[in-house]
Amino acid sequence: MARIDLRGLAHSYRPAPRGRADYALKRMDMTWRDGGAYALLGPSGCGKTTLLNIISGLLVPSQGQVLFDDEDVTDIIPEDRNIAQVFQFPVIYDTMTVRQNLEFPLRNRRVPEPEIAARVAEIAEALHMTDDLPRKARGLTADAKQKISLGRGLVRRDTAAILFDEPLTVIDPHLKWLLRSQLKDLHRRYDFTMIYVTHDQTEALTFADSVVVMHEGAVVQVGTPTELFERPAHTFVGYFIGSPGMNVLPCEITGASARVGHQTVPLARGYAPSGGKVELGVRPEFVRVDDGPDGLAAQVTDVEDVGRYRIARLRLEGHPMAAILPDGARLDGHTTRVGFDPAHVNVYVDDHLVEGEA
Ligand SMILES: Nc1ncnc2c1ncn2[C@@H]1O[C@H](COP(=O)(O)OP(=O)(O)OP(=O)(O)O)[C@@H](O)[C@H]1O
């Protein structure tokens, strides 16, 4: 498979784009590692499909280059890019058998017959579909059809990357986890470069090594699930990842202390923000309630039981925030005192994470 580099890439669907807002994809530079398992995560309309289509060649970018292993493929048509795509709906030949579907990409490339037979047998075995090989694709379930779509990418040895665009949309919920874990096993076995588009954070976080978070046409963070959780690089990542999302509180900062309204929050590091919108980000998991007399005064507006845990909805100096309650914790009154673990308080200026000084 291949390493993919995007250099100075940007795309506008408008013929004469003027400002940043006219770009569905804002200018970006990025590398996708050979053999990496990436999830491309973001809300509807943030540009995920646009980016995927540029990598596959279905769309030519208005600016910049796409390189596969240092070769510029920007103007190369999809058929010659050796990219396999698995879409929301399976794209297979219904009237052919499973075997013929898997053979098709190899026949097209005039691969010798003995090699076709060996490769198809190997991939069918990896997909747990050996018994289905003689069956017509038409009668198969949606999950089996999606596995064939994937198999048609895997069967070729020259596939540069496999791109998935919300491939589990039409799959029954109880089969989704099974397909996800099979995909993970296949990735381990064949080490293919994969980019998996989804707007579902659970799907992204359970199987990707790196999650690429997009927001309004820009990549706002590339990181492991742990990095996205502990150090969101942008307030949007804080909101989007986690349930409930990160609390974001407007504040003023002097050195190693922040003021939220009339109350002071100690920070682990010193900061010297020079203007801009300054905010604290703290995940509900790191908010302590009933924190004793030194805690910050907060109002309790609700306690929700979401099954696995309870969430306290609070107001701190008028700003809504949430805390995940530890097992057995009681919140009797309408007010409480909250504390934040300073090591888990992030500081944002104009929505971007800033590093403090020790
Ligand atoms: N063919 C097109 N012509 C004009 N605008 C388009 C076209 N395709 C997408 N857009 C716009 O580009 C932006 C990004 O769309 P894109 O489909 O890439 O987002 P997405 O993150 O994949 O969304 P979804 O999850 O809904 O598929 C959106 O504002 C969309 O309206």
Image (tube, rainbow, N blue to C red):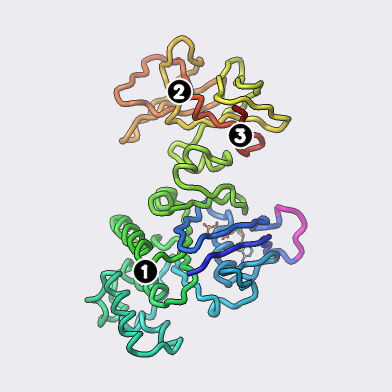
Q: Which sits earlier in the primary sequence, circle 2 or circle 1?
A: 1
Q: Which sits earlier in the primary sequence, circle 1 or circle 3?
A: 1
Dominant secondary-structure state across the stretch colored magenta: loop
Marks 3/2 in contact by CB < 8 Å: the verdict is no
Rounded to the nearest whole Å, what is the CA distance between mark 1 and mark 3?
44 Å
Decide which of 125, 168 is in the foreground and name it.
125
Q: Which sits earlier in the primary sequence, circle 3 or circle 2?
A: 2
- Where does residue 285 sit, x and y in percent of width and height? 42, 31
Q: Amino acid at mark 3?
A: Glu
- At label 2, counting other C-alpha atoms closer than 10 Å, the crowd grade (few under 14, some 14-19, many 20 or more) is some
- Where does residue 117 sit, x and y in percent of width and height? 31, 85
The quadrant of the rendered image in which ligand 1 is seen is bottom right
If the image is split into quadrants, where does the C terminus sit?
Answer: top right
Q: Residue at x 33, y 21 (%)?
A: 329
Marks 1/3 in contact by CB < 8 Å: the verdict is no
* Residue for badge 1: 146
User: Which range is magenta?
Assistant: 16-21
Q: Residue at x 47, y 72 (%)?
A: 84
Asked if 286 appears above or below 107 in the picture, the reply is above
Determine the image quadrant of residue 332.
Answer: top left
* Residue for badge 3: 355
In the shown orientation, is residue 338 left or right of residue 98?
right
- At label 1, counting other C-alpha atoms closer than 10 Å, the crowd grade (few under 14, some 14-19, many 20 or more) is many
- At label 3, counting other C-alpha atoms closer than 10 Å, the crowd grade (few under 14, some 14-19, many 20 or more) is few
Q: Nearer the viewer, mark 1 or mark 3?
A: 3
Q: Nearer the viewer, mark 3 or mark 2?
A: 3
What SS does tag 1 mark?
A: helix
* Residue for badge 2: 301
- The residue lying furthest to the left in this view is 131
Q: Nearer the viewer, mark 2 or mark 1?
A: 1
Q: Amino acid at mark 1?
A: Gln
Q: Amino acid at mark 2?
A: Thr
